[in-house]
Image (spheres, rainbow, N blue to C red):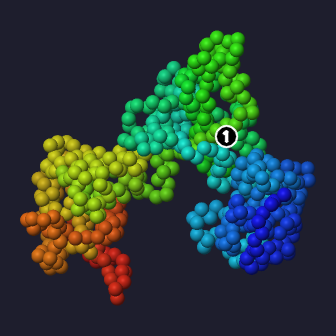
Amino acid sequence: MLNLIRKEPSEALLIGRRALEAVNGVELLHDFRWDPLFNKWVLFAALTVDTDPHGRIPVQTKWYIHVDNSYPQGEIEFFPATDDGISLTFPHQNYNGDTETDRPWRKGKICLDPVIRVFGRTGYDFGPHDEENRLVWHFERAKAWILAASRDSLQSNGDPFELPQFRTDASSIIAFSESPTTFDKWNESSYTYGLVEFVRIKDDPKIFVTKSFKTLGGREVYKPKWGKAFSVENANTRGLWIKLNAVPVIDPWQAPMSWHELCQVCNSQGIDLMEIIKNAARLFRDGRPHYVLLGFPIPEKVGELPCIRFWQAFQLPVLSSGNRVPNGFRKGEKGYWYRDRTQILRGSETITWIHSENWHRNEIFNRGKLPPGITNTSILQIGVGALGSVVAEQLVRADVQNLTLMDGDKLHIGNLTRHTLGLLDLKDNKAEAVAKRLNQSVPHSNVNSISGYLPCDSAELLNQYQVILDCTGEDDVLFKLEKTTWKKPKTFISASLGFAAKRLFIYCQKGDEFSTAAFFRIMKPWLERERGSYDIEEMPREGIGCWHPVFPARIDDIWMMSGIVIKSIEKFIQSPPKKPTLLVYEQKWQNGFFHGVELVYQEDENE
């Protein structure tokens, strides 16, 4: 019985509750009560749905409905009642095997929100948001969910595939890298279990990244491809990997939560889990817990063939070692395993699932990346200052996989107002520091650096790149590009900012040499305009002593213009101009309000 403090519901909530009285199949068993533990209003109701009376869901089920005090805003959640509710776990439902402490409902909240709700904007949601209809809509959705669950139709062909809820220890993460390509490789392999080695991210000892999969004897089976952040060889943590034939699930859609349930699920797939652990146990008797990765095939969408091997991790308890043997046994595998099987891995013991994530680049960059023809292009970027550091950041986070940064300058305190580096990078070479930062920003990043200026010591090094990107804004760099011998045609792109970043100049030229004459002919009118837009005597200066002007530009202007640089790079790589081309973008203002950035000039040198 709920023992809740007395609090009066709002008029909006009362309007929503009264509207339920006209809904068929809804019987209110108890009016709204305030639950101070959950900070929610709780409504107790019975729902009657025309299900199969001999099926897994009775015609009438009881539910506790949680509603935010901000109704009609906020969440509305349905939990099965402990008595006369549903006890099984279905798709689109949290694990339903546990009851809430001191409360008469189970924890198996059902999912009623449309898939598009993930965007977080009510304008994209299909449901109403007025006080009279929102509660009614959720009750109708709950009835529809119950009917679909009773007919095993909660998952329809074409729906995005969802795993059952593995109630995980969210404080740790196991990261792996799998794709359709690696799925085929796993299917070709005859090995079914072995050792997995992990690399730990230094700043967070609870994030483990799979380094390699091996047999128990040490033969490599699969080595994921990672960026430089995980290129270290000291994989000092290891666990056990096991291939399964299907998702480990108890009908209809419950993840196994005990050793007994997990062994049953594995046995149904012809896999003897305990025998595998027994064979590997000697490698884990070091007094520490280890991880086990269960790899099973999953599709992208319901009804499709599997295309990814997902590795769901759980924690293997500390196995017996040292003097920890039962009475009557000597130290050794026989005694250790007897203790493990009867005390450590007992069937009633709960499985500690660990949060697992696929960090393959297909998954990480699915929110937005450049086209493959761009991401696979090799780019040498010269200049990693205010503009260059942001351009490099955007290229890497858009999945450019072959980027080298060149800059001979070091980071100074004045750079911090508009650079991507910070205090810990002061006095460090910009190219090296930005490359290090970017390699630690994305798991698959492979950014290289050259801490120097043109000309480079090795002409062969420069010739390996397809695109030469200049972000320095310095004439001297252009003259050096002209003097460099290029063995193959290159796409040369030069991006520079006008005074206070009010204009952006993007120049592109394709060929086996760079022409400064072509550049200055097409740029001359704009350079003259720029000289007339400022007074050198009024330029800001840096430091005390001999006067030295610095280029003024706010960070928001630089970052805004850098996005245009990325889009221009994409265009020029996909469709290199036949003649030297200049694009000029300019900020536009009207009546004191910013109107955007406009392309004000587009011309090729021979037009």
Residue 123, relative to residue 450: is it above or below? below
In the rendered structure, the answer to whether residue 539 lies left or right of residue 193 reads left
The correct choice, above or below, for 535 with respect to 392 in the image is below
Three-letter amino acid code at the position of disc 1: Val
Mark 1 sits on what residue? 247
Residue reaching furthest to the right: 53
Q: Position of residue 135 (x, y in %)?
A: 75, 71
- Left or right of 568? Residue 365 is right
> For the point 65% across and 50% down, which residue is it?
162
Q: Would residue 271 be visible to someone looking at this image?
A: no
Q: Nearer the viewer, residue 410 or 192?
A: 410
Question: What crowding class fits label 1: few (fewer than 14 Cα within 10 Å), some (14-19), or many (20 or more)?
Answer: many
* Percent coordinates x, y for residue 397 in the rendering: 40, 55
Could you tell me which quadrant the C terminus lies in? bottom left
Q: Nearer the viewer, residue 537 or 481?
A: 537
Residue at horizontal 35 percent and vertical 50 percent from the top: 438
Residue 203 can be seen in this image: yes
Q: Position of residue 381 (x, y in %)?
A: 26, 54
> Which corner quadrant holds the N terminus?
bottom right
Q: Quadrant of residue 349?
A: top right
Q: Quadrant of residue 572?
A: bottom left
- Residue 502: give x, y in percent of width and height: 26, 75
Residue that extends furthest to the left in the rendered view of this protein: 546
**Residue occupying image coordinates x 33% and y 69%:** 556
